[in-house]
Image (tube, rainbow, N blue to C red):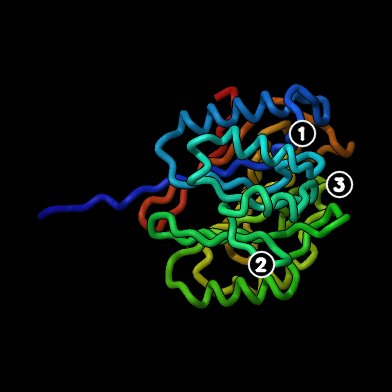
Amino acid sequence: METTTPAQSRILQVSDLHLTAAGGRRAWGTDVWKNFERALEIARSLEPFDALVLTGDLANMGQRRAYEMLRQSLGDDLRRCFVLPGNHDNRRRLRTVFADRCTMDSKTVNFVIDVGQHRLIGLDSLRRFRVHGLLGKPQIDWLSQQLAATSRPVLLFLHHPPTKVGTWWLDRDALRDAVELASCIDGTSVRGLFFGHVHQGWSGMFAGVETHSAPSAAYQFRPASLRPGAVARREPALRVIDLIGDKVATHVVTADD
């Protein structure tokens, strides 16, 4: 009897780049462009992959030049790259430079793509002039419509954590409408939720869904630190998401690896 092997796909999540508008400049004491180049080397060593998802804080101060430099540095990987904003980003400038790498309306930057048997949906949690995140009712209603329209297993991506990660100064800036998001995805085909912002790898549950953070491509915060902004390491890292049939497996890869 002939057997078949489930199709396998790979997604790479890179987050919190904090890129400056010129090479060689530092953010939080780190050469962020050098680290991003190292992150790209790591990503390319993990071929083949089907999508590269950048989950926010792409530019440290939302400069258009930083987005333009990022787009150029991606090279051929641009075709499989999708972007979301974080609290450090400027939504309008990001949308202008990456107009072909997201699905947009006048207020949010999102994406909807299919990879293997899964559907990937990107959510915009940026709230202007605030560090914390907010999706807002129109976007949650939009997500509800997207979930109702597909029978595929769904993976969600956003910048801000919808749940606490155990570091008080990061937990205070989590997603403000996490309760509404939980209600939206309860009982649906959402099988994984992936976020950034916390500059560390973390795994847990949210609304009955396996939930994971990506470490930073720039620098890593110390888990459970009492001092805000405490840096544990200045090496880049990223999250690997493997899709085998309708199953999801994920792990973190660092420059040390």
Front one among 251 and 77: 77
Q: Secondary structure at mark 3?
A: helix
Of pointers 1 and 2, the one earlier in the residue sequence: 1
- The residue carrying pointer 1 sits among few (fewer than 14), some (14 to 19) or many (20 or more) residues within 10 Å by Cα, namely many
Three-letter amino acid code at the position of disc 3: Trp
Please determine whether, in this image, residue 214 is positioned above or below residue 137: above
Q: Secondary structure at mark 1?
A: loop
Residue drawn at the location 59% of the way across and 22% of the way down: 256
User: Are the residues flagged by discs 3 and 1 in contact, CB closer than 8 Å?
Assistant: no
- The residue carrying pointer 3 sits among few (fewer than 14), some (14 to 19) or many (20 or more) residues within 10 Å by Cα, namely some
Q: How many marks?
A: 3
Percent from the top left, x then y, of residue 150? 46, 72
**Mark-to-mark CA distance, 3 and 2:** 32 Å
**Mark-to-mark CA distance, 1 and 2:** 26 Å
Residue drawn at the location 52% of the way across and 59% of the way down: 120
Residue drawn at the location 59% of the way across and 61% of the way down: 103
Front one among 221 and 49: 49
Three-letter amino acid code at the position of disc 1: Ala
Of pointers 3 and 2, the one earlier in the residue sequence: 2
Position of the N terminus by quadrant = bottom left
Q: Residue furthest left?
A: 1
Percent from the top left, x then y, of residue 84? 66, 52
- The residue carrying pointer 2 sits among few (fewer than 14), some (14 to 19) or many (20 or more) residues within 10 Å by Cα, namely few
Three-letter amino acid code at the position of disc 2: Asp
Would residue 224 be found to the left or right of residue 254 on screen? right
Percent from the top left, x then y, of residue 162? 71, 59
Quarter of the image for residue 218 reads: top right
Of pointers 3 and 1, the one earlier in the residue sequence: 1
Q: Which mark is residue 105?
A: 2
Where is mark 1, residue-wise? 21
Where is mark 3, residue-wise? 169
